[in-house]
Image (tube, grey):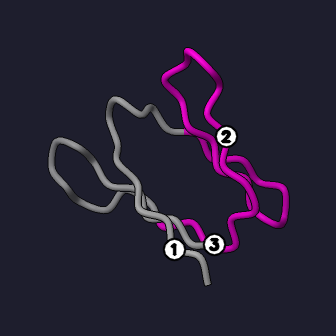
Amino acid sequence: MRVFVYSKKTSKTVAQINHVESVSEPEGGSLITFTTESGEHFSFNKKEVKTTTYQN
């Protein structure tokens, strides 16, 4: 999957994450975590960003 992360305030692209293997959102938390095929973890505050995910 490919994930695009945008700022809610400016709508500008914050990050583009390629080869995403999994997405997790801990219950009751405000973080969203993307894990890539290589094992890297990227976490963002859901109150500050919005995301779009594409599955190829």
In this rendering, is residue 31 above or below 13? above
| Tag 2–tag 3 contact (CB < 8 Å) | no
Q: Quadrant of residue 47?
A: top left
Which residue appears at 40% of the width and 54% of the height? 51
Q: For residue 21: magenta?
A: yes
Query: Does dot 2 land on a helix, a strand or a loop?
Result: strand
Does label 2 or label 1 sit earlier along the sequence?
2
Residue in the picture at 67% in, 40% down: 24
Q: Mark 1 belongs to which amino acid?
A: Tyr
User: Which segment is the magenta one?
Assistant: 16-43
Quadrant, the N terminus = bottom right
**Image point (61%, 33%), residue name:** 25
Q: Residues within 10 Å of mark 1 (few under 14, many from 20)?
A: few
Q: Which residue is mark 2?
A: 24
Which percent across, then down, holds residue 17?
A: 57, 66
**Badge 3 local density, few (<14 within 10 Å), some, or many (20+)?**
some
Residue at image mark 3: 1
Residue at the farthest right position: 38
Which mark is drawn over residue 54? Answer: 1
Q: Secondary structure at mark 3?
A: loop
Q: Foreground residue, 54 or 17?
A: 54
Q: Residue 19 appears at what percent x and percent y? A: 69, 73
Label 3 to label 1: alpha-carbon separation = 6 Å
